[in-house]
Amino acid sequence: MKKILVLTVKPFAKAAVDGIKKIVGDAGYEFALLEKYETQDQMLAAVKDANALIIRSDKITKEVMDAAPNLEIVVRAGAGYDNVDLAAATEKGIVVMNTPGQNANAVAELVIGMMIYKVRNFFNGKPGTELKGKTLGLHAFGNVAQEVARIAKGIGMEIYAFDPFLTDEQISSKGVTPMHSVDELYSKSQFVSLHIPAVKETIQSINYDLLSKMPANGVLVNAARKEVIHEDNMVRFMTEHEDFSYLSDIAPDNKAVFEEKFDGRYYFSPKKMGAQTAEANINAGLAAANQIKNFFKNGDTKFKVN
Ligand code: 3PG
């Protein structure tokens, strides 16, 4: 009997776990759960006889795959799969999938929430500004960015997007003005929200030169990955530009520097929380379980990323 292990250091909502368990049971497979694990040894022991893994940001390295000789498929319940060693998986013939779009609305709501929190001075009682009429640049225009655009339109923001993988028509069909370079996007946008994956082309790509393109009172919002920021450049830029703020769902490695130097100009959530809603957990968790079932039953490899 195939064994499907939900392996999440950051647990899913109970309703999501119950839903996954039901899909797995109804399909005739064995369900197993390891949440909030604290050591690599615990993780390695749990994967030993698993045929499939459902994970979140859990790191699936070659060492983990070596410890799981029966592993056939890993589904990252979420969008970004930079936590899975794709080369090692491919070499071992392990299929890796994500569940695109399933947690997009949750992340988008957090992006808008962080922006409102910032322009209202972190709800400290002092007068702030509004988002209506302000410019918003979406750096990449995938599922999350499209949800951000939908909400920002309702607020009355002027929205631009740059995405080299989409046509102008695909962007403008969502009521968003297409841009043709990152420079153009950043120079038009008081607010920029990052929706790029962490890959070798993007790591540390948000640098001093790019930030310098932004207009006065610029705000960079990062619900993507901390690795895409050139942190030293960011610190230098913020030191030189006292009107600039940085909001991120993932604290930078040099968080202490921000705390010391940039009071009132940054926000970092204590733990990545963009996808931390019951709805996102249910959407992504159940999609992952169904994708595994379809893979085992029909060889369906839709959403394969390696
Ligand atoms: C994603 O890539 O889907 C998000 O960053 C959510 O990550 P999480 O499942 O670890 O919250």
Image (cartoon, rainbow, N blue to C red):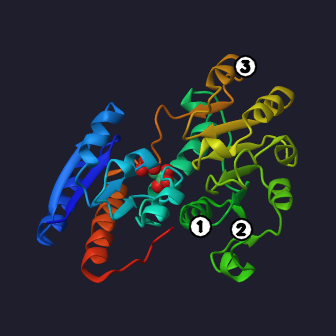
Asked if the residue under mark 1 is in contact with the one under mark 2, i.e. CB atoms within 8 Å, the reply is yes
Examine the image and state in which quarter residue 129 appears.
top right
The residue depicted at 37 percent of the width and 60 percent of the height is 74
Is 244 positioned to the left or the right of 294 in the image? right
The tag earlier along the polypeptide, 1 or 3, is 1
Residue 186 percent location from the top left of the image: 81, 54
Distance between the alpha carbons at the discs numbered 2 and 3: 33 Å
Can you say whether 303 is above or below 288 in the image? below
Is 175 positioned to the left or the right of 298 in the image? right
Residue designated by label 1: 142
Task: Name the element at disc 3.
Answer: helix
Label 2 crowd bin: few (<14), some (14–19), many (20+), radius 10 Å:
many
Nearer the viewer's eye, disc 2 or disc 3? 2
Task: Name the element at disc 2.
Answer: loop
Residue designated by label 2: 163
Can you say whether 245 is above or below 60 in the image? above
Residue 261 percent location from the top left of the image: 72, 19
Residue designated by label 3: 261
Type of amino acid under label 1:
Gly
The tag earlier along the polypeptide, 2 or 3, is 2
The tag earlier along the polypeptide, 2 or 1, is 1
Residue 98 visible in this rendered orientation of the protein: no
Can you say whether 123 is above or below 302 in the image? above
Is 54 positioned to the left or the right of 131 in the image? left
Residue 201 percent location from the top left of the image: 73, 56
Distance between the alpha carbons at the discs numbered 2 and 1: 8 Å
Distance between the alpha carbons at the discs numbered 1 and 3: 34 Å
Residue 122 visible in this rendered orientation of the protein: yes
The residue depicted at 18 percent of the width and 52 percent of the height is 32
Type of amino acid under label 2:
Asp
Asked if the residue under mark 3 is in contact with the one under mark 2, i.e. CB atoms within 8 Å, the reply is no
Q: Which of these two is toward me, 261 or 201?
A: 201
